[in-house]
Amino acid sequence: MGSVGVGELAEIFKAYDIRGVVPDDLDEHVAEAVGAAFARQTGARQLVTVHDMRTSSAPLAEAFGRGATAQGAEVISGGLGSTDMLYYASGVLGIPGAMITASHNPARYNGIKLCRAGAKPVGQETGLAELKEMVAAGVPAATGPAGHIVTQDLLTGYAEHLKKLVDVSAIRPLKVVVDAGNGMAGHTVPTVFTGLPIDLVPMYFELDGTFPNHEANPIDPENLRDLQRKVTETGADIGLAFDGDADRCFVVDERGEIVSPSVPTALIAARELAGEPGATVIHNLITSRAVPEIIAENGGTPVRTRVGHSFIKAEMARTGAIFGGEHSGHFYFRDFWFADSGMLAALHVLAALGHQDAPLSALLAEYARYSASGEINSEVADQAGITAQVHEVYASRPGVTSDDLDGLTVQAPDWWFNLRPSNTEPLLRLNVEAADQATMESLRDEVLGLVRGTSRP
């Protein structure tokens, strides 16, 4: 197989996956080369592929399969599915896998997420850099016989497996609005919810990689507006929103209010710790202070980590943590091969809601203790210089501590903030939390003034 230019590969090989514009950056030739290189790198006799609903996804999956089979591997093609379905397949079959998706990126993008057997992540430091070099050099032809692509239904087993991990058998009847954003939740939710006492109100379940209704990115509140309205209009008990590849989940309560992802993190942590007291739970450093408090109150050991799934997964594997949560709507489960699953998190919230009689807002009230700003981005040329200035301003204040685990975190008894640089853009990302709204807003405005140069130290 011929080589691919090093320059174009540098553009599409990201920290955790391969992603670019189709066909300018990522085409079937590149996907085939990646499939061949991955089969050769892993030495696996079998691999599994799953793809999302983008028009380019099935052809890219087929090309990846051609590359892998040319190296003698058998490829199990799962067809349409979510990213966590790929993790399920890799885990239950014990083989490496590839998910063809660009998640919530615009329609012109696509990508390849890779995992080793048992859903172990592949990133720059765990094989992706080497894979890029192999593709750039050209993958040698295999000498043995070619493998074959075989199709296999994974959705049924995936749905059954999730419902073994969370007891949703005896929940009360619930009206649930789900906004799939024209992404893969429209494919998976009907099967997962089969047999449950759920009155499903589907929104944008038509698979459409052009995203005609809104971006499939629930972290942006604008993309939750339709769901909020539908929940209140229909008198639903809960609203769920998934991203394009359905590995992230956001929650809206019965009042139509957006629930901070820190709240289900704390709720699921408490549920998991009830079954395994004393276990470790991972949280990233921009989750609410309530999360480690609630983990400790429920007899668990909270462990703080950097933002990013590779850090969460690595720390979970190192500590044997039972659960991990990120403020971006990713939720990780030891019993799901330490991988993340938005659907599994959704089932936990539905189980908690359905096993008692209070509305969701009342159920979650004990897990929401502080006022948070949400993430605020500021464009700055000198990320390190501005961060150092902010650190200097707060370092001398009484009762204030700081650390540099991921950017700058500054903490006081009744507030904290984190200021961290984007890895890909000239941005600083600010998250602020405080005991009350007024303190949060005052601190937020003060830090933003320093970052944006509108106030002096």
Image: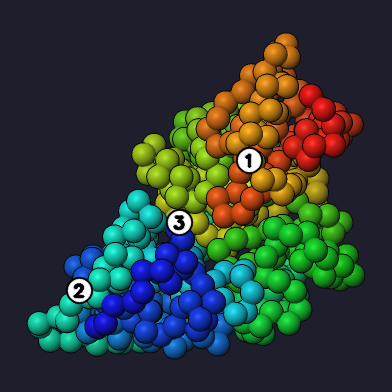
Name which residue type carries label 1: Gln
Q: Which residue is mark 1?
A: 383
**Label 2: how many Cα within 10 Å (few below 14, some 14–19, many 20+):** some
Q: Quadrant of the C terminus?
A: top right
Q: Which residue is mark 2?
A: 45
Above or below for 69 versus 372:
below
Name which residue type carries label 2: Arg
**Label 3: how many Cα within 10 Å (few below 14, some 14–19, many 20+):** some
Q: Position of residue 353 (x, y in %)?
A: 70, 53
Q: CA distance from mark 2 to mark 1?
A: 46 Å
Marked residue nearer the N-terminal end (3 or 2): 3
Determine the secondary structure under disc 3: loop
With 140 as the anchor, is 271 left or right in this view?
right
Image point (49%, 69%), residue name: 19
Image point (33%, 65%), residue name: 132
Residue 15: which numbered mark, if any?
A: 3
Name which residue type carries label 3: Ala
Image point (33%, 81%), residue name: 32
Front position among marks 2 and 1: 1
Q: CA distance from mark 1 to mark 3?
A: 20 Å
